Amino acid sequence: MAWINFLKPKNKLEEGGRTSAPVQRDALEPEKNCPNCRKDIPLSRLWASDLVCPCGYHFRMKARQRINIITDKGSFRELFSGIKADNPLDFPGYKDKVETVRVASNEEEAVVCGTAMIGKQKCCLFVMESYFMMGSMGSAVGEKITRLFEYALQHRLPVVGFTVSGGARMQEGLLSLMQMAKTTAAVKCHSDAGLLYIAVLTDPTTGGVTASFAMAADIILAEPGATVGFAGARVIEQTTKKALPEGFQKSEFVLEHGFIDSIVLRSNQKKYLTELLKMHNGRAVI
Amino acid sequence: MSDVAYDRVKLARDNKRPTGLDYIKNIFKGFMEFHGDRRFADDPAIVGGIAKLDEYPVTVIAIEKGSTTKERNYRNFGAPQPEGYRKALRLMKQAEKFGRPIICFVDTSGACCGIGAEERGQGQAIAENLMEMSTLCVPVISILIGEGGSGGALALAVADRVWMLQNAVYSVISPEGCASILWKDSSKAETAAESLKLTAEDAKSLEVIERILSEKDIGTKEFYDRIRVLLIEELKELVKDVDLTQNRYDRFRKIGVNAIIKE
């Protein structure tokens, strides 16, 4: 199972990926090397295709960019933006690390939450930020996710969530670990009220986030080629001293093993989510 | 100061400590073990079934590390596969159906880290336990008796009361793992152990656990009798709680709320 298989759309809804035009070269233009096809792609070309290489490789994307391509123009209203990490355990170097990351990422925390319209369907939305300590979940991320599900329950709204995370934030120790239980309990309450939660797993979704709210959704989608797993591949290789199978922990591998519903190209995600939200809007009357 | 926390880690990992089955055999009467997750396999790293606590029927689940080399290999050193968590959840749902309280003994360095565990959804299995345990309508008490390693321990510890043995540890990552990721140097595990705040006293002051159990005369009849008495007392209170699931939600809901900046 080569993971490049993602180029073949699996059904009608997943079609609609941009066709790959020949790459125009300009000596002066900045380029980015694609880790899949090894070609240098002009940045402008990548921007125009929402950071998807003509070969189909999906580059990582900042949370705000993702919100721009997924939500209806001007519809996103941010919630809980004032909640951010402190240093509850006085963990060495944590405060400085957070300060540096805040400046570099221009984000206060590793998740952005709010309400939005997707294809004219109202929903609650969270998008995790890989550029903020690899989307790790500390007390602030846990609190924001929990509040979003509580808000969605109160307003009877579906939740759409884009995950990207290295797992729990170890600098907050046990408090981070407990966020797994806290967020998942909030998802359960939202779920028990008959409300919809769709997770879109993006590269990478691992550790404590996989083992909590990412895998607790009604419908679990993933981007092509995204790493999705619990333990890190390098750790598994070192522990078991076995060669990992081809495409191990890629979303195609996880789909094959039955843990996600579908792999959806970035270019088609908005349409796909719109369709899903519409299908769950209101009760069936047959 | 920096060696104190790591000494606890070593004590928690000590092969001579009583293991899950010791607690089951000495605290309860008439333990009947039930096997299998009804999906794929039976995981020997998690032991579960029904037993009597005095005259009360309860469901007991324990992570078992094994006490001899042969048994430790058989039990995968107490590192459960997804099937172990699924068996535990099956037994918890059964307990809920028959109105039995649930008592879990937790002792693991972490959920099994392997190719098969990933292929069969380790992350999904843990997530499902967290989700389903949060709304079980029977009382749940979890006791950390040795190592409380990350999500693999939490998957049996979404409980109304969480207790820790005096020398048990509870952590989001092993001190060695933390030191190797943060400082690229696993020999700094002692510093990491100190910084992670993983001792029973730390967990109590962070309000992650309710009670620390003394290890005086550990492994003796007196030791197990003390735990049995505490369990009975606590369960008598918990069965009267009409807002059990709401209180369990609130118990976890408040953790970390004081650890953030709100603007």
Image (spheres, coloured by chain):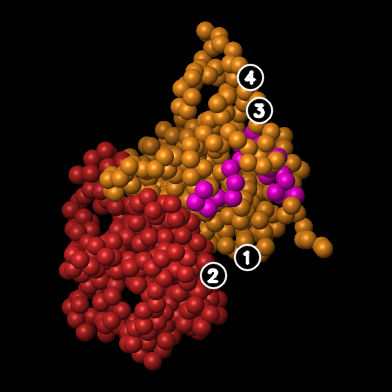
Chain colours: A orange, B red
Magenta segment's dominant SS is helix
Q: Which mark is residue B20?
A: none
| In the rendered image, residues at marks 2 and 4 fall on the same chain | no
Q: Earlier in the sequence, mark 4 or mark 1?
A: 4
* Residue in the foreground of this view, choosing between A251 and A87: A251
Cβ atoms at labels 4 and 1 below 8 Å apart? no
* Residue in the foreground of this view, choosing between A137 and A49: A49
Q: Residue furthest bottom?
A: B55
Horizontal side of residue B162 vs B124, given as left or right = left
Pointer 1 chain: A
Q: Which residues are magenta?
A: A256-278
Pointer 4 chain: A
Pointer 2 chain: B
Residue carrying label 2: B135
Q: Give amino acid for label 2.
A: Thr
Q: Earlier in the sequence, mark 1 or mark 3?
A: 3
For image coordinates 48% across by 56% down, the residue present is B124
How far apart in space, not on screen, are marks 1 and 3 (Cα)?
39 Å
Q: Give amino acid for label 3.
A: Arg
Q: Residues within 10 Å of mark 1 (few under 14, many from 20)?
A: few
Horizontal side of residue B80 vs B2, given as left or right = right
Residue carrying label 3: A18
Q: Which secondary structure, mark 1?
A: helix
| In the rendered image, residues at marks 2 and 3 fall on the same chain | no
Give the answer, above or below, for where B126 lies relative to A239: below
| In the rendered image, residues at marks 1 and 3 fall on the same chain | yes
How far apart in space, not on screen, are marks 2 and 4 (Cα)?
52 Å
Q: Which mark is residue A192?
A: 1
Cβ atoms at labels 1 and 2 below 8 Å apart? yes
Of discs 2 and 4, which sits in the foreground?
Answer: 4
Residue carrying label 4: A21
Say whether residue A64 is visible. Answer: no
